[in-house]
Amino acid sequence: MKRRIALLGLALLPLAAMASEGSVKWGYEGENGPENWAKLSPDFFACSGKNQSPIDLSGFIQAELKPLKIKYQAGGQSIVNNGHTVQINYAPGSSLSLDGKVFELKQFHFHAPSENLIKGKSYPLEGHLVHADKDGNLTVLAVMFVKGKANKALAQAWAAMPQEAGEPQALPTQVSALELLPKSRAYYRFNGSLTTPPCSEGVRWLVLKHPVTASAEQIAAFEKVMHHPNNRPVQSVNARPVLD
Ligand SMILES: [Zn+2]
C-alpha cells in the first residue's frame, strides 16, 4: 500500500520536474525548493525526517570530545560546478579517524550563505569536507568562513572555477584541504543528514568552532557562479543532542 501511494505521488509530478536521466530536478527556490524536496520523489522521503541537517547549533551538551585525528595530504585534483555547488574532488589517501573508524576524504564543496548556524549566527560561506568509511558511512567536517584575508586553497581552486555547470575539470596543482582548516580544531558534534536530496540520515556532523577567512572577492566569485543562495534552511533539532 505504501508503495502504491509513493508511486501515485510520483505520477502526479509535473513532467517538467523530471530530468531526462530519471533523476528529479531540485533546487533552492520555488516549486523545487527545500520545502518541497520530500514531495518531489519517493527517493527524497528522508528530507522530511527527524534528524535532518543543517541545524542551528545551540543548547550544547558538554561532552569530552576527543581531538580530531586528521591525516590530509594535498589531493584536491578536480573541480566541478554541478549546478548546486562547486565541488573539489579529492584523491585517495587523506582521512579522518572517528569512533575507531577511518573515513576517507572524498570531496569538499561550499554553500553561501552558511547552512548551519552557530548560536543563531550565519556566516557568508560554509565548506563541507565529505568523508566516507569503507561501508559508506559519512562524516562531514564543516568549516565557516568570515570575510578577511584571501584563503590559499580557495585561490588555487577558484583559479579554475567553472562558470557553467558541467563536467569536472582537472586542477593544475593539487589543492590541500588543510589550508581550509583553522589552527584550532575544536568542534561541535551532532547526528544529521545530507543537506541536499536524497537527504539521507546517519551522517556524523563535526562543525569547527573557529572560522577561517576568505576574501570578499572569493566569496563573491562563488555567489556569482551559483546565481542564487545554495543553503538549505535550518531544520528542527528534535531529540538530538549537540555536543560541545
Ligand atoms: Zn554541503
Image (cartoon, rainbow, N blue to C red):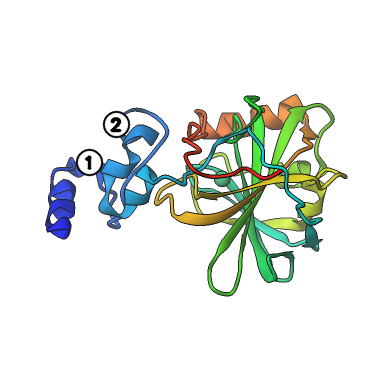
Q: Residues within 10 Å of mark 1 (few under 14, many from 20)?
A: few
Q: Quadrant of ligand 1?
A: top right
In the foreground, 2 or 166: 2
Q: Position of residue 190 (x, y in %)?
A: 60, 48
170 sits left or right of 30 in the view: right
User: Which image quarter is the N terminus in?
Assistant: bottom left
| Number of the label disc, if any, that sits on residue 31 | 2
Q: Position of residue 234 (x, y in %)?
A: 50, 33
Q: What residue is rendered at 88% in x and 45% in y?
A: 183
Residue extending farthest to the right is 183
Q: What residue is rendered at 59% in x and 74% in y?
A: 134
| Number of the label disc, if any, that sits on residue 16 | 1
User: Which image quarter is the C terminus in?
Assistant: top right
Q: Amino acid at mark 2?
A: Glu
Q: Position of residue 164 (x, y in %)?
A: 51, 41
Q: Residues within 10 Å of mark 2 (few under 14, many from 20)?
A: few
Mark closer to the chain start, 1 or 2: 1
In the foreground, 99 or 63: 63
Any atom of ligand 1 within 8 Å of the CB at mark 1? no
Q: CA distance from mark 1 to mark 2?
A: 11 Å
Q: Amino acid at mark 1?
A: Ala
Q: Position of residue 122 (x, y in %)?
A: 63, 26
**In the depicted structure, whether residue 73 falls above or below residue 199:** below
Q: Quadrant of residue 217?
A: top right
Mark 1–mark 2 CB contact (< 8 Å): no
SS of the residue under disc 1: helix
**In the depicted structure, whether residue 40 falls above or below residue 228:** below
- Front disc: 1 or 2: 2
